[in-house]
Amino acid sequence: MTLECWMGRTAACAGLLLTPAGGLLAQTGPAPASAVRSAPLTNVRYEIAYDSATARNRSLTVSMAFDVGGPGPVLLSLPAWTPGAYELTFFARWVSKFAATAGEQPLEWDKVDYDTYRIHPAGARSIRVSFDFLADTLDNAMAWGKPDFVLFNGTNVLPYPEGRGLDFPATVTVKTQPEWLVATGMAPATQPGAYRERSYHDLVDKPFFIGKMDYDSTQVDGVWTRLASYPAGALTGPARAQLWERIGKMIPAEAAVFQETPWTSYNVMLIFDPSYGGGSALEHTNSHVGIYNPQFAGTPILASITAHEIFHAWNVKRLRPADLVPYRYDRPQPTAWLWVSEGITDYYADLAMVRGGIIDADQFRNLIANKIGTVTDAWPTALEDASLSTWIHPTDGTQYLYYPKGSLAGLMLDILIRDASDNLRSLDDVMRGLYRSTFKQGRGFTGAEWWRAVSSAAGGKSFADFNAKYVDGRAPYPWDHILPLAGMRLTADTIRAPRLGVASAQDSTGAVRITQIAPGSVAEEAGVRVGDLLLALGDVAINDPDFGSAFRARFGKNEGDPLPIKVRRGADTLTLHGTVRLLSRVEGRVEEDPDAAEKAVRIRNGLLTGTTGR
Ligand SMILES: [Zn+2]
């Protein structure tokens, strides 16, 4: 997943000192009782209906039919979370009108825990359960309905039998308006509107868009790629052509790492909605769902998040830490390895952008510098600890630190492997080697296997000390030693930049809420309050993907200039009157070293082009 990528890169640079917050729906609680076991089920068929009539209530009509193959009650559960969105949500919260029948006969049912339903078949062999699901949440792990559209995930609406394993086949039939379109990565079955997968893991990994949308396809690298966007008209013309062109450049650059494209088709599924303050996306095996403020259309950040999500189709959906294999849906599944699954995915998104020619080398180094700045500004936090902690959404600003810091750990490993092997091996060899030796063998990778692969690519060099200091430990990253090995160096510029003096948090819709106000700051003097939603500074909207540089350009010149601060407080929209105050801050810059040695230049070029060799 990615969340508030743009906030880290832009608003934080403007001195807003953002502290991301997680989904508003996140809760913790006891894990459901799972020592229970359902009667065996076969012939599982789900049906999901959404049309202009059910859309009035923003409600999906769901049914599940099956045959019962043994004695005892049927126990059906709904998931507590969606893989990739590492937080507990408990989808049973959105269920209403639950019923179970055998033919016309209603069956007795109750709950074993808050998301497990116990149905008494009373001798019946064929049972149907039905319920409504409220599609009211704009979140890529959730369901969201509009009068002409719905997004839903299988985790939201597809119950599974308790204690019977998840490798059961099932069909999903979609009922909707004849003129509406359906976009999904799910495999079509023979009947119209029907889909079939071999296991529950696949069923809940293929989200659906149903409704009016722009939907087209092309072949990228010889494989069908589809682009669905809602609402119709939100991504058309040059912006759509540009995204297509960039997808056509990023996928080959990513596939080169693994030397295969492991899907028969890939769905890029995008929602643009003005109520969404930022940008966020969630990965799947052959698709991803991205939700963006409309201002993201046509920006490089949209391409960057897209590159991140597509790389996930290899890294985490296939190559995955053993802690996450197989996924379980009833409780948290923490792992210390999200710095690889998310951070290194983010590193490869940057690499795909530069290797595919979407950004140039200067822009690539700026991405590195921004991440170094983000990590330097945060409280020192170990990568393993940040990975484990995401489930509880820490409030100290380090909740998503494993993205930028994990990305930088990937850069360091890449440089160290290339340096130790005289540029004959790279991090690509580690990713590809583990992909083949673990995912292709039907399992996840262990920590020992990861470090063995890194060490082997580096000609046997030990990374025990690296792990102790920079992954398990909190030591600052040694850029003065690492970057010169790749013909780069970190320099520091002292810049005068406007500063508001607030901490803020982004909620699951991307809205930016003020959480702290520094005493004596511009914000305090203007009357900003904790709890205000920040909308704009002057004429620069907070959800402008280019917020940071636009804000600095507009308000970075004259101390004392008026600084209108537009906030929403309750139902009111207010413009508060601040004044520009410029503060000196040190900003790191990563530049090419013109005097780099020949080997370092080769390593630098290898990174930028995805090549190895002397
Ligand atoms: Zn991600």
Image (cartoon, rainbow, N blue to C red):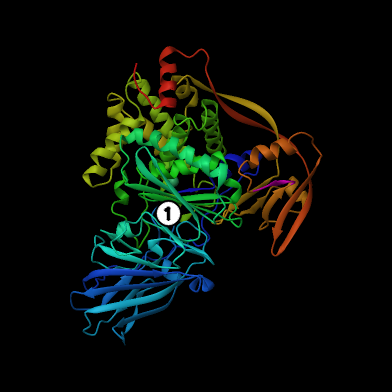
Q: Quarter of the image holding residue 331?
A: bottom left
Q: Is residue 591 above or below residue 541?
A: above
In this picture, which residue range is highlighted in magenta? 538-542
> In x, y percent, where is residue 144?
50, 63
Report which residue position mark 1 lands on: 86
**In the picture provided, is 29 more to the left or to the right than 370?**
left
> In x, y percent, where is residue 486?
44, 21
Q: Quarter of the image holding residue 85?
A: bottom left
Q: Quarter of the image holding residue 451?
A: top left
**In the picture provided, is 573 more to the left or to the right than 598?**
right
**In the picture provided, is 507 more to the left or to the right than 472?**
right
Q: Is residue 212 above or below residue 462?
A: below
> In x, y percent, where is residue 477?
47, 31
Most common secondary structure along the magenta stretch:
loop
**In the picture provided, is 549 more to the left or to the right than 608?**
right
Q: Is residue 600 above or below residue 175?
A: above
The answer to whether residue 337 of the structure is visible from this angle is no
